[in-house]
Image (cartoon, rainbow, N blue to C red):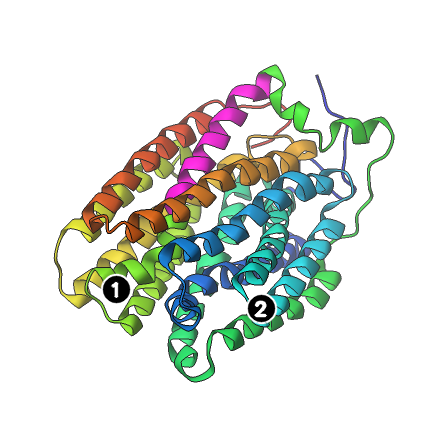
């Protein structure tokens, strides 16, 4: 059953070649994803100091990590689909407001409960904007460069996280964790007027068009059902591993024998690797099918994780393996989003990606929470990393299945 055209300014085909407006939109989405990277990863960098200041254990810290992920599920599943009905611009701007308010309030949080609530608010904005940006980037690029555009947007997240780690390592001992959150809020606010200028105007759908556009039920039409389930599995199990690593890499590095400062640097190197891996994946996707590229990178990431957790290494080599994990794990996982963008027609793209983000956040919540409880129970580091290789392999297989079955009339990929 065909779906009628939906969002104004959004055509299923997209431009035949790069346009200045299209490049500006992709660049803006990259910058917004940078803000996402700061807002999410900064909590992992300040976690050791926050735990020390408030006297909280790894289990409570794991709950705080998961708060933002719960918010992302809310944003992805219940707010992002509005982008298929109301338009990309309105929803992205609303998401930036949620992120800004939540980050400012987080910097003044007086208790774990308040910080938890504010992290949910921040996450709801991030979950919304991730889905809307992936859809908008795909629609702003030429059809043969769609995977590249979506991949480049994903690279903004680890790119910002690199500098977040380096800056926090220097400023945290001087100014404290509250100032770090406040600075992150300022960066998010600055992006709002830029987005106002760059984002194309929306023409909301109406009448019968709105019934289909943004409807989650449409994701389970016979021709979409298998790829929807496979995509949800890939994102769920991928985020289970990814957020375990992203949330705990400084703490895990300290457990592997590094100092607090070197642990933060390990987190920064991981994110540098994630940026390089995502960029590499984006350009390799022009030549290598994502259905082969993504699983290969994820399996190699599992090997690097086992080495990190089970082999005693000098500081420089420990940092190098953290870098390699970033290249392979986040570079490979971020290849799932170009796959997702090509799995649905334009009128369902934000809905499809948003629900994948929302369902996947279940894995993202379980990942750091389970890791926190296992660490609190003094589980060996080697066991921790080996256990997380199981969902990583499931993610690789599911990503392969989505890419293999996504041949879709009218998707123009």
Q: Residues within 10 Å of mark 1 (few under 14, many from 20)?
A: some
Nearer the observer: mark 2 or 1; the answer is: 2
Residue displayed at 49% across by 39% down? 362
Q: Residues within 10 Å of mark 2 (few under 14, many from 20)?
A: some
- The numbered mark at residue 242 is none
Is disc 1 placed on a helix, strand or loop? helix
- Spot occupied by residue 79 in the image (x, y as percentages of width and height): 69, 44
- Spot occupied by residue 221 in the image (x, y as percentages of width and height): 63, 18
| Residue marked by disc 1 | 254
Residue displayed at 48% across by 50% down? 66
- Tell me, yes or no, whether the two marked residues, 2 and 1, touch with CB atoms within 8 Å: no
Magenta region: 223-242
| Residue marked by disc 2 | 109
- Spot occupied by residue 315 in the image (x, y as percentages of width and height): 18, 67
Q: CA distance from mark 2 to mark 1?
A: 27 Å
Magenta-colored stretch includes residue 2: no
Most frequent secondary structure within the magenta stretch: helix
């Amino acid at each position: 059953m065909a779906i009628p055209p939906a969002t104004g300014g959004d055509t299923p085909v997209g431009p035949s070649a790069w346009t200045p407006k299209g490049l500006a939109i992709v660049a803006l989405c990259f910058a917004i994803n940078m803000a996402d990277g700061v807002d999410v990863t900064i909590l992992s960098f300040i976690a050791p100091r926050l735990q020390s200041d408030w006297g909280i254990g790894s289990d409570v810290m794991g709950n705080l990590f998961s708060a933002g992920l719960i918010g992302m599920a809310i944003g992805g599943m219940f707010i992002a689909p509005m982008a298929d009905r109301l338009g990309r611009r309105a929803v992205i701007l609303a998401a930036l407001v949620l992120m800004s308010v939540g980050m400012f309030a987080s910097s003044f949080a007086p208790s774990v409960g308040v910080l938890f609530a504010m992290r949910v608010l921040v996450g709801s904005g991030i979950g919304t904007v991730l889905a809307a940006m992936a859809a908008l980037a795909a629609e702003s690029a030429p059809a043969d460069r769609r995977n590249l555009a979506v991949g480049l947007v994903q690279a903004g997240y680890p790119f910002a996280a690199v500098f977040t780690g380096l800056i926090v390592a220097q400023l945290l001992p001087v100014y404290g964790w509250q100032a770090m959150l406040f600075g992150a809020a300022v960066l998010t606010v600055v992006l709002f007027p830029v987005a106002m200028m760059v984002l194309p105007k929306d023409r909301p759908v109406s009448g019968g068009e709105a019934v289909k556009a943004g409807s989650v039920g449409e994701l389970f039409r016979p021709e979409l059902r298998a790829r929807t389930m496979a995509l949800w599995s890939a994102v769920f199990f991928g985020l289970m591993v990814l957020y375990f690593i992203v949330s705990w890499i400084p703490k895990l590095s300290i457990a592997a024998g590094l100092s607090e400062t070197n642990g933060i640097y390990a987190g920064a190197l991981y994110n540098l690797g994630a940026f390089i891996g995502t960029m590499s994946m984006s350009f390799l996707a022009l030549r290598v099918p994502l259905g082969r590229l993504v699983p290969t990178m994820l399996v190699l990431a599992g090997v690097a994780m086992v080495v990190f957790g089970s082999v005693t290494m000098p500081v420089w080599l420990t940092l190098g393996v953290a870098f390699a994990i970033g290249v392979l794990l986040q570079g490979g996982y971020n290849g799932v989003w170009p796959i997702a963008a090509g799995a649905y027609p334009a009128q369902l793209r934000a809905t499809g990606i948003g629900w994948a983000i929302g369902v996947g956040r279940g894995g993202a919540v379980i990942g750091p929470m389970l890791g926190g409880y296992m660490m609190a129970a003094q589980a060996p580091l080697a066991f921790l990393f080996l256990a997380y290789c199981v969902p990583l392999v499931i993610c690789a297989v599911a990503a392969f299945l989505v890419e293999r079955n996504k041949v879709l009339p009218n998707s123009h990929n």
